[in-house]
Amino acid sequence: VQLQASGGGSAQAGGSLRLSCAASGRTFSSSGMGWFRQAPGKEREFVAAISWSGGSAYYADSVKGRFTISRDNAKNILYLQMNSLKPEDTAVYYCAASSGRDWYYTPGRYDYWGQGTQVTVSS
């Protein structure tokens, strides 16, 4: 699976952005998918994950109620809708694909990673 993240950019606090992750390969529709982020000087952290069917999802407490993860298996695209953005959301965001079908919050459960897209939120 090859992953290409896009949709990052700059936003004001309180604004919105939508990230997309286009996947190639036949296994996308059977893979659990996730979003992670890494701010300068910090470790990569979990943001959100979704099961292969989209039937279940899991969020980090820091984004719960503000971010929504979704997927379109017909188009092989993963999304992250980010609303009510805060300056602390500033980071490089990565999409990831697992060989498993469930959602996972640990980076080690993911086998494929996209290149990352920068999100910058100003106050």
Image: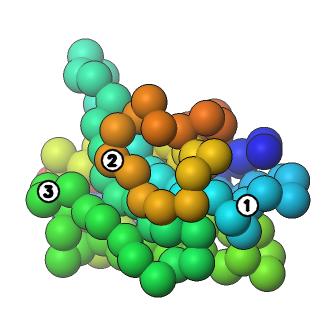
Identify the residue at image location x=78%, y=57%.
Answer: 27
Colour scheme of the rendered structure: rainbow
Cα–Cα span, label 3 and label 1: 27 Å
Q: Nearer the viewer, residue 117 or 44?
A: 44
Inspect the image, locate mark 2, and give the three-letter code of the amino acid beneath it: Tyr
Which residue is outermost to the top?
A: 41
Circle number at residue 105: 2
Which image quarter: residue 17?
bottom left
Name the residue tied to disc 3.
Answer: 62
Percent position of residue 60, x then y: 21, 56
Classify 116 as above or below 100: above
Q: Are the residues flagged by discs 2 and 3 in contact, CB closer than 8 Å?
A: no
In primary-sequence order, the first of circles 2 and 1 is 1
Q: Nearer the viewer, residue 36 or 89?
A: 36
Which mark is nearer the camera, 3 or 1? 1
Which mark is nearer the camera, 2 or 3? 2
Classify 119 as above or below 45: below
Q: Are the residues flagged by discs 3 and 1 in contact, CB closer than 8 Å?
A: no
Q: Give the crowd class for mark 3: few <14, some 14-19, many >=20 residues within 10 Å.
A: few
Secondary structure beneath label 3:
loop
Cα–Cα span, label 2 and label 3: 13 Å
Q: Are the residues flagged by discs 2 and 1 in contact, CB closer than 8 Å?
A: no
Inspect the image, locate mark 3, and give the three-letter code of the amino acid beneath it: Ser
